[in-house]
Image (spheres, rainbow, N blue to C red):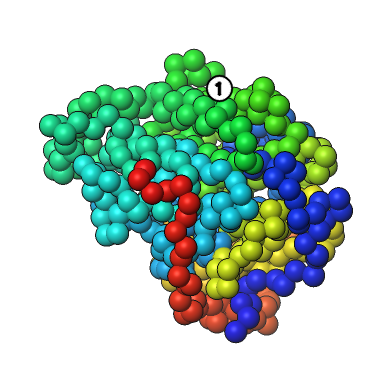
Amino acid sequence: MKNIFKKAANIGCCLSALSCALTASEKPNVVLIFADDLGYGDLSCYGATKLKTPNIDKLAADGRRFTDAHSASAVCTPSRYALLTGDYPLRIGSTRPVFLKSGLVIDQEKQTLADVMKDAGYATACVGKWHLGFGEKTPDWNGDLKPGPLEVGFDYYYGVPTVNSHPPFVYVENHNVVGLLPDDPLVYGKKAKTEEMHEKMGIDEIGGADAAHELYDDYQVGTHLTEKAVDWIKEQKKDPFFLYFATTNIHHPFTPAPQFQGTSECGLYGDFVHELDWMVGEIVKTLEEQGVADNTLIIFTSDNGGMFNETGQDAWDAGHRLNGELLGFKFGAWEGGHRVPFIAKWPGHIEAGSVSSQLICNVDMLATMSALTGAEIREGQAIDSVDVLPAFTGNTSEAVRENLVLAPSRPGILGLRKGKWMYINSKGSAGFGGKKRGEHGFAGPAAITYAGYSNSDIENGKIKNDAPPAQLYDLENDLKQTTNLYKEHPEMVKEMDALLQTYQPAKKPAPKRKKAKGTSGN
């Protein structure tokens, strides 16, 4: 049955001068920078005034800035799953982040974004936050961490295995923990010798491996990962390359390097954004120094909206608006949870200084890279991914995507975009449940009331007793989601709810995966 959420493109595989039969020398390099928890209002080119992001702003000035781009999930792990597989994460029941003991979330038989690039002749690397698990069922932290990134299409991996807020606080390179010694293994239930700080968690969940832990300095993670990404770019001399640079900035704990501390007007939150901006600048500078900037497509976006954690609350009190005018925060179904910054730059192909209101999503990157490189998507793969290359390179007024499913953290709750309409099949945000200023998970009705937002279903920080059972918003006329139109448009509610009711996980098994070249023995 045809997937109702995927628009069949009527656009040919060739766009203007772009051919789908590119030679190796013609194929553009691709650098995908995937920031962590960066909200819609966290960049000066998206309206921030309490911090400055000149390097990212220049990307936008030299490329295209999107105003209606989304993460398929408002949660980190499921969002990354969508990005790399082209499938909505709810197809595998993924709604929450994974941690220390989780096996690899991605089925090894899935065709991933990295696979598509390898099939097209690209060298592939993932540098930064992985957060998709290791191992068949659970990681062997003292052995080979596989399956992992190398088993789903990447030639090289270096980075933070889970997330910078949770253990283990070590680096992983390819299949192994960096600096791990045979006589000093990682031990579950032992407190790690790592710096304790605000919004850093689980230090007593796994320890040992003192030498490996010593290499991990929270305040140098951003600069260290940047060095690794830069070094890998410099090593690429022959084939076109694909770099997936998944930063830990700006996820808590907020640990900017000393040179960035105190540089913004909204505390550590803004300082961490400043470090992220520097990281982007270093990547761009390296591409220029290597003479490949003009033949490189750079995509910059975020895994979900900004989080109203304690440091985020401090930034808010200082006048910074994490998600701009959008309602809600990370983990939630309101726009602030999943509408994210998205910038694409490709000299000569993407109009400089342009702005697009096309509806696009991170789940679309696989189909888009397939169209860009000419690599074929196998049957049954990337079933939710739509080719949005026309939105990158053209000025088409035709919508590249008609519908989009969006998921908060609460299982069973979904949002659906269709044109100007946003439908949420429940009350509230379906995200974090914190109710007071100072709570790490401050969110929902209480948080938006504190933040000064208004919504017709909410009064005094709580959902009204007579609020409708679900929500419908006209985003064209009410981007701030102030008025729930559920009762005013019953036919639209019925239509959109029917679409969500037919949304089911794919039942067709994935085809047998071919062994990727260059991954054995790593």
* Frontmost residue, 271 versus 237: 237
- Where residue 85 appears, as percent x and y from the top left, is 52, 60
Kindly indicate the quadrant of the structure image that contains residue 109: bottom left
Residue sitting at x 47%, y 44%: 155
Relative vertical location of residue 20 with respect to residue 491 in this rendering, above or below: above
- List the residue tagged with mark 1: 264
Residue sitting at x 41%, y 63%: 107
* Frontmost residue, 21 versus 510: 21
Which residue, as the protein is rendered here, is positioned at the far bottom? 1
- Where residue 14 appears, as percent x and y from the top left, is 81, 58
Does the image show residue 261? yes
Does the image show residue 40? no
| Quadrant in which the C terminus is drawn | top left
| Quadrant in which the N terminus is drawn | bottom right
Residue sitting at x 85%, y 60%: 397
Left or right? Give the position of 293 relative to 191.
right
* Frontmost residue, 447 versus 22: 22
- Where residue 496 appears, as percent x and y from the top left, is 62, 77
Amino acid tagged 1: Ser
Kindly indicate the quadrant of the structure image that contains residue 220: top left
- Where residue 95 appears, as percent x and y from the top left, is 42, 61
Kindly indicate the quadrant of the structure image that contains residue 296: top right
Relative vertical location of residue 215 with respect to residue 404 in this rendering, above or below: above
* Frontmost residue, 498 versus 248: 248
Which residue, as the protein is rendered here, is positioned at the far top? 259
Relative vertical location of residue 366 with respect to residue 129 in this rendering, above or below: below
Residue sitting at x 41%, y 37%: 159
SS class of the residue under badge 1? loop
